[in-house]
């Protein structure tokens, strides 16, 4: 399959890199509940007495999120806005006297903090409160009515996140539904279903494959198609999607860093879920862990080593210390800073080109720089962003060798870190 250029929307999506997922709803007020377990959850329990979406969005922006996605309706069918098409919504709850609208406050918070706004919607629903229909057309009408409310009443929506879980028994009129969505919000980016701009990576653990060309053969509106689709890696900060009094399952900083390096660092996006609690706030332990994680990322990747400008010669790129720098630090080779990681970025405006490469570290045995070097990494794709970690070593020069590519390529970033 030849390389395929990403769309403008897909390039923008990849530039977001990291987003926050907020699972919040009626489920938040029924700890211990699991999807499809048959336990009813009356709307009367929904009453977040300290609700503050701005706290959610400010917090995730502080730790680097460029976009946020919130569950507007999960599989239980409870709508976080006063939908005219169901009695099972915030309008049936005591919160804000039945006049509240979580979606409105969330979209306003995203715009106030200048981060991209995403809405999650699950077409499936179950239980006694689920809307019943005689046929599939009526179900599609219901789906379209609710999506139309979300895409009409809250201004520009940047991202629509469809969850296909539990929808297998219904044959949706995909072209009709997508036609309405694209008409109401022509610039919207769609995740996952039917006419996707972005694609699920295939797990919910935050990990992308090492080879990530973005080229996927899939069905688009029922027709087989080869296309470019950036991966998104959705995953959880705790053991459950909704806040479930499971603070003991908070992931460690070390694990979160690994998830970042295996998602963003492999040319995909990371969508990390944080579940607001019954107060309507992000829990303090979760906030503390996010800040610790951000501090560790900044420690590792905040300040590149002071190598000179990247140079290219044929299929090799290199960064090295200048003679002046080496004259300053070389009383002995032990004064050369340790390097332990590299960030690469490829120009993918025409598609991902690099298919195989090697990274070499030069041995600091002489001054001027020796041509003797060892291979510290063998990789496949580079793509939007590639993070490489290797055992720390002192090196005055790093060389990237492109071994195989699909046509022309251009490396836009080559930086080393300690």
Image (cartoon, rainbow, N blue to C red):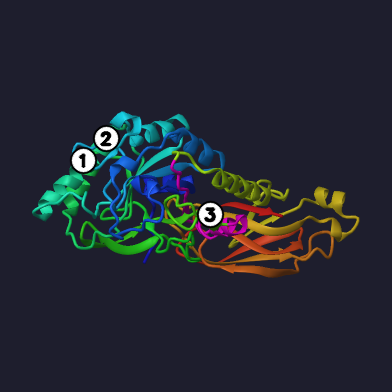
Tag in front: 3 or 2:
2
In the image: residue 334, left or right of residue 268? right
Is disc 2 in contact with disc 1, using a CB cutoff of under 8 Å?
Answer: yes
Please indicate whether residue 32 sits to the left or right of residue 181 in the image: right
Q: Secondary structure at mark 1?
A: loop
Considering the numbered disc 2 on the image, is that residue within a helix, a strand or a loop?
A: helix
Q: Which residues are magenta?
A: 252-278
Mark 3 is surrounded, within 10 Å at the Cα level, by few (under 14), some (14 to 19) or many (20 or more) other residues, namely many
Mark 2 or mark 3, which is nearer the start of the sequence? 2
Q: Which residue is mark 2?
A: 91
The answer to whether one can see residue 185 in this image is: no
Q: Which mark is residue 385?
A: 3
| Callout 3: SS | loop
Classed neighbour count for the residue bearing mark 2: other residues with Cα under 10 Å, few (<14), some (14–19), many (≥20): many
Residue nearer the viewer, 251 or 371: 251
Q: CA distance from mark 3 to mark 2?
A: 44 Å
Residue 357 disc label: none
Q: Is residue 253 magenta?
A: yes
Tag shown at residue 87: 1
């Amino acid at each position: 399959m030849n390389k395929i250029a990403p769309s403008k929307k897909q390039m923008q999506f990849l530039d977001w890199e990291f987003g926050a997922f907020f699972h919040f709803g009626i489920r938040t007020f029924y700890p211990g509940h699991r999807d499809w377990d048959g336990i009813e959850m009356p709307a009367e329990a929904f009453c977040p007495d300290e609700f503050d979406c701005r706290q959610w969005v400010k917090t995730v922006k502080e730790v680097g999120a460029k976009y946020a996605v919130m569950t507007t309706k999960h599989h239980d069918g409870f709508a976080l806005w006063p939908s005219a098409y169901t009695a099972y919504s915030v309008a049936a709850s005591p919160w804000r006297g039945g006049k509240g609208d979580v979606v409105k406050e969330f979209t306003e918070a995203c715009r106030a903090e200048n981060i991209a706004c995403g809405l999650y919607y699950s077409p499936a629903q179950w239980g006694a409160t689920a809307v019943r229909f005689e046929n599939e057309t009526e179900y599609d009408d219901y789906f379209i009515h609710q999506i139309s409310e979300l895409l009409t009443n809250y201004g520009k929506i940047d991202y629509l996140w469809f969850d296909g879980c539990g929808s297998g028994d219904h044959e949706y009129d995909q072209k009709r539904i997508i036609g309405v969505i694209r008409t109401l919000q022509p610039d919207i980016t769609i995740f996952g279903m039917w006419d996707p701009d972005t694609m699920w990576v295939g797990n919910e653990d935050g990990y992308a494959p090492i080879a990530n060309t973005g080229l996927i053969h899939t069905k688009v509106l029922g027709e087989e198609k080869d296309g470019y689709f950036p991966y998104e890696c959705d995953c959880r900060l705790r053991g459950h999607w909704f806040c479930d009094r499971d603070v003991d399952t908070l992931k460690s900083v070390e694990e979160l860093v690994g998830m970042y390096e295996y998602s963003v660092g492999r040319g995909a996006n990371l969508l990390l879920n944080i579940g607001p609690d019954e107060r309507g706030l992000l829990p303090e332990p979760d906030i503390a862990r996010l800040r610790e994680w951000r501090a560790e990322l900044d420690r590792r990747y905040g300040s590149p080593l002071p190598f000179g400008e990247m140079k290219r010669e044929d299929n090799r790129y290199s960064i090295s210390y200048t003679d002046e720098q080496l004259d300053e630090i070389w009383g002995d080779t032990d004064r050369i800073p340790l390097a332990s990681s590299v960030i690469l970025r490829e120009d993918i405006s025409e598609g991902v080109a690099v298919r195989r490469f090697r990274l070499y570290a030069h041995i600091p045995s002489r001054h001027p720089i020796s041509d003797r070097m060892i291979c510290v990494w063998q990789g496949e794709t580079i793509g939007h962003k590639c993070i490489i970690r290797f055992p720390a070593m002192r090196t005055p020069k790093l060389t990237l060798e492109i071994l195989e590519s699909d046509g022309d390529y251009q490396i836009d970033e080559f930086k080393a870190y300690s």
